[in-house]
Image (cartoon, grey):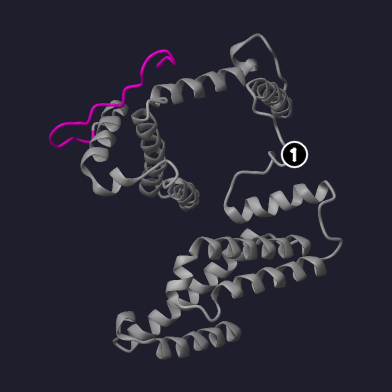
Amino acid sequence: MSSQNNKIAAPAPVQGTPTASGELDDLLALMARLRVDCPWDKKQTNHSLIPYAIEEAYELGEAVQSEDDEDIKGELGDVLLQVVFHCQMYAEQGRFDMSDVIATLQEKLIRRHPHVFEAETLEDDVAVKLRWDEIKAEEQQAREARGKPKRRLDNTKAGSALMQAQDVQKQASKLGFDWEGVAGAVDKLDEEIAELKSELIDKSKTEVKKNIREVEKELGDCMFALVNVARKLNLDAEAATLTCVHKFKSRFGYIEAQLAAAGKRLEDSDITEMDALWEAAKRYERSS
């Protein structure tokens, strides 16, 4: 493990054409080489990689459900890539490296399992969970001692933006920051949509592009308000969105199949034809 008193050195890039050895050190050297010679990898930052890390976690979940070993290995590798990529960039910044990350994880696992590595005895998984929570509380106290106070909304669950939005609203509601019924949430949604429209309507593409960050904020406000409507209706915003995604994919698949039956590709069609087939897909759903 590297020391805070020693300068962090990023791994040396592999030379020549590497082989798939299965060794962690070789993987780190391969990542270092990509950061030197791959234009895309060179331009990435820790912040730019955030969406990819989230995406890979979801794809791993889908692969595990598929029970396909090759897919699972591939997706586990993609998740590992995110860890290796981040560690490479932090090492380049002289902050920490992979050995620091591994050591921190080892320390945490040992600390949170006193019933395994110490004389402490816990009877069942319920007792283990309670002890785990006690240890996490002790860790939080240590964080506060380092100047990292815990805020009331810090318990928001990690997850997609929709999941976090719904959970943070739920936490705020428990503290009294909420409307009594769904009407207030709907009114807020209407308000946010009106503000988004004001950033878009009667403006040229150049004007919109120039003010794209403000548009992004207004769009985010609309989505957050819509999630609030879902919460007030006791619906899961993530599940509702996934249902829509699956429905869209199904209908688009119908369009593709119908075009293929006519000897055409999607690229050979146009919006008028595809829109007509979209409506046909909706009728097919209702009849089946």
Q: If the image is split into quadrants, where does the N terminus sit?
A: top left
**Residue drawn at the location 71% of the way across and 25% of the way down:** 137
Main SS, magenta region, reads loop
Residue 22 visible in rendering:
no
Q: Is the residue 118 above or below the residue 245 in the image?
A: above
Q: Is residue 9 covered in magenta?
A: yes
Instruction: Name the residue type under label 1.
Output: Arg
As drawn, is 241 to the left or to the right of 89? right
Expressed as whole percent of the image width and height from the top left, the position of residue 24 reads: 32, 28
Expressed as whole percent of the image width and height from the top left, the position of residue 46 reads: 42, 41
Specify the farthest residue to the left.
Answer: 16
**Residue drawn at the location 43% of the way across and 22% of the way down:** 100
Specify the farthest residue to the top.
Answer: 119
Image: magenta residue range: 1-20
Q: Work out whether residue 36 or residue 287 is closer to the camera in this orientation and state it.
A: 36
Expressed as whole percent of the image width and height from the top left, the position of residue 108 reads: 56, 22
Q: Is the residue 267 above or below the residue 62 in the image?
A: below
Q: If the image is split into quadrants, where does the C terminus sit?
A: bottom right
Expressed as whole percent of the image width and height from the top left, the position of residue 28 reads: 30, 31
Q: Work out whether residue 131 or residue 7 is closer to the camera in this orientation and state it.
A: 7
Q: Is the residue 175 above or below the residue 246 in the image?
A: above
Q: Which residue is mark 1?
A: 152
